[in-house]
Amino acid sequence: MKLPFSLARRFVAAETLNDTIPVVRKLNAKGLYVTLDQLGEYVSDRKVAVEATDAYVDLLRRIAEERRDSRLDANISIKLSMLGQKIDEGLCYDNLLRLLSVATEHDIFVRLDMEGSDLTHSTLGLFEKAYPYHPRHVGVVLQAYLHRTAEDVARMCELNARVRLCKGAYKEPPGVAYQQMPVIRERFIEHMQRLIEHARYPGIATHDDILIDATREFVGRNGITADRYEFQMLYGIRPVTQEQIVADGYRMRVYVPFGTQWLPYYMRRIRERKENLWFVVKSLFRK
Ligand code: FDA
């Protein structure tokens, strides 16, 4: 049974790219930058991985076209598991390079989202392999909840790479990830400070006021200008705060997911916040 899209509407812009473009334009008009995410995860078939790469290439070309016709600010986020990472890393790398050459041609930045910890090592390995060929057009994500992240932050600083820092959205065992929110926040703040000082244009991706305030305090105290980093939030979460952060003089990028395969993304957002269940219940009774 296919669930109705109305359920996901709060967190997912639309099921098609045509319907998503006006959403991007509206956000841009409010001074918000955008990252587009064509939804989907793990593919287990080589042909589907190539098709997913084709779809990302089409997305890059469409952004370039829209930008030519009238100003539009959007980069993209991708999941390597959609490019065949779980089937064959070589295939995934070929798909990634094909995509990055189109991104470089059109000067559009591509972020590699970070998935479950079974893929962290592979994702960072593929990133490091592709990065020398496309240093301005590819970046990666690090998750503050993982024990390994301090070392990964150090490495990304060495490479002067572009990193999005987030807490981490997957259920991970205590052997690999911190489980307590105060500890995750503490690690996040350490990584945020290091990335802002020593890496290139990090994305500070959180809706958590404690972490937003810690970032504002850190950059204020050190005289770091607003063009050296950006805040990032998810579409549909704290939209008023998103605009307020821009009004306060900071950069804010909104991660805008779209597409028909919205269920796993939507379930992660529901798991994060119990009150989101109310949005589901209400949306069942609303047209
Ligand atoms: P936290 O969940 O502690 O929430 C703080 C406050 O924000 C809450 O009190 C509430 O007010 C509000 N809030 C947060 N989530 C909400 C929700 N779902 N609904 C309503 N209100 C909510 N993860 C990952 O593993 N890999 C990735 O690549 C990415 N990419 C990514 C990009 C961007 C732009 C963002 C913002 C986040 C990610 N994440 C991610 C997700 C991230 O790891 C994390 O799961 C969520 O951001 C939730 O953690 P917060 O730090 O936002 O705060």
Image (spheres, grey):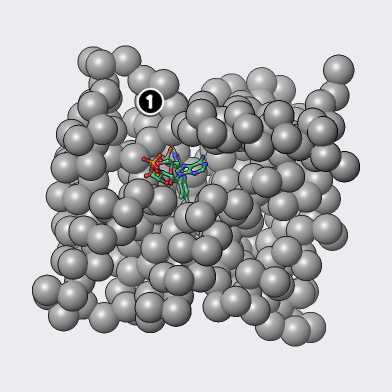
Q: Is residue 203 left or right of residue 187?
A: right
Position of the C terminus, as image quadrant, is top right
Q: Amino acid at mark 1?
A: Ser
Give the residue drawn at x 38%, y 25%. 117
Q: Could you say where residue 245 lies in the image, as x and y percent from the top left?
A: 41, 70
Considering depth in this image, is 154 or 170 the residue closer to the camera?
A: 170
Q: Could you say where residue 237 lies in the image, as x and y percent from the top left?
A: 54, 50
Q: Against 52, is 227 above or below?
A: below
Q: Against 173, is 53 above or below?
A: below
Considering depth in this image, is 37 or 222 the residue closer to the camera?
A: 222
Q: Is residue 237 left or right of residue 259?
A: left
Image quarter for residue 29? bottom right
Q: Could you say where residue 35 lies in the image, as x and y percent from the top left?
A: 57, 59
Q: Which residue is mark 1?
A: 117
Q: Residue furthest left?
A: 221
Q: Against 150, is 264 above or below?
A: above
Helix, strand or loop at label 1? It is: helix
